[in-house]
Image (cartoon, grey):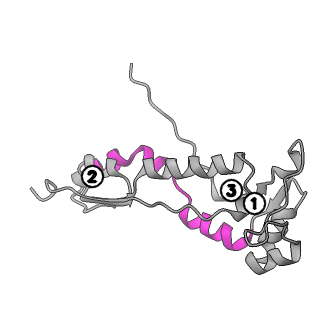
């Protein structure tokens, strides 16, 4: 008997409103951020020249939970990935073909299922970038001090059999 998977979507009203801050739970305090120019600890007031005040406050906070800024919550409301779309991409493409709708998706499975085209980041690249980012944090780097890791490899797939 085939196994039917189930996906549970988190309603917007249940979206987390706070980030968990691991700093208070570490066995020993992290070293302060160090200036690459001087090799010495950066005083908190100088952090504000590098980072916005809110980010500087998060960097030194001993609170276990930090409120997510409303601007970020607004982005999460719009761009939160949906497990349903990813897990059912091929079925969605097949439905588009049956309904003769030209569909576009960021997932390759969509064009494999018969959809017109897909354009989006290559999943493997995203996972590798995440692993590097997490590795740096586990080695003591502060997340606020790391560059934002955006996807570096994108793939455009056009289904040439779509029009036949």
**Residue 103 found in image quarter:** bottom left
Is residue 71 shown in magenta? yes
Extreme residue toward the top, this view: 1
Task: Kindly report the distance in space between the C-alpha atoms of the residues bearing marks 1 and 3.
Answer: 6 Å
- The residue identified by callout 1 is 17
Left of 36 or right of it: where is 155?
left
Instruction: Give coordinates of residue 52: x percent, y percent.
Output: 76, 77
**Tag 3–tag 2 contact (CB < 8 Å):** no
Pointer 3 or 2: first along the chain: 3
Disc 3 is placed on an element classified as loop
Is residue 8 shown in magenta? no
Disc 1 is placed on an element classified as loop
Task: Kindly report the distance in space between the C-alpha atoms of the residues bearing marks 3 and 2.
Answer: 31 Å
Extreme residue toward the left, this view: 164
- The residue identified by callout 3 is 15
Left of 117 or right of it: where is 68?
right
**Tag 1–tag 3 contact (CB < 8 Å):** yes
Instruction: Give coordinates of residue 117: x percent, y percent.
Output: 27, 59
Magenta stretch bounds: 69-95
The residue located at (70%, 50%) in the rendering is 137
**Quarter the C terminus occupies:** bottom left
Left of 109 or right of it: where is 102?
left
């Amino acid at each position: 008997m085939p196994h039917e998977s189930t996906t549970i979507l988190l309603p917007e009203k249940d979206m987390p409103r706070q980030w968990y801050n691991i700093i208070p739970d570490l066995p020993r305090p992290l070293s302060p951020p160090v200036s690459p120019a001087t090799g010495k600890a950066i005083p908190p007031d100088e952090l504000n020249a590098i980072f916005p005040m809110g980010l500087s406050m998060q960097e030194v906070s001993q609170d276990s939970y930090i409120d997510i800024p409303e601007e970020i919550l607004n982005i999460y409301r719009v761009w939160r990935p949906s497990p349903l779309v990813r897990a059912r991409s091929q079925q969605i493409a097949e439905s588009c073909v049956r309904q003769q709708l030209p569909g576009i998706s960021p997932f390759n499975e969509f064009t494999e299922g018969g959809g017109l085209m897909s354009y989006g980041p290559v999943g493997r690249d995203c996972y590798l970038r995440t692993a590097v980012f997490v590795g740096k944090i586990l080695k003591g780097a502060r997340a606020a001090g790391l560059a934002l890791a955006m996807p570096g490899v994108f793939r455009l797939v056009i289904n040439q059999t779509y029009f036949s």
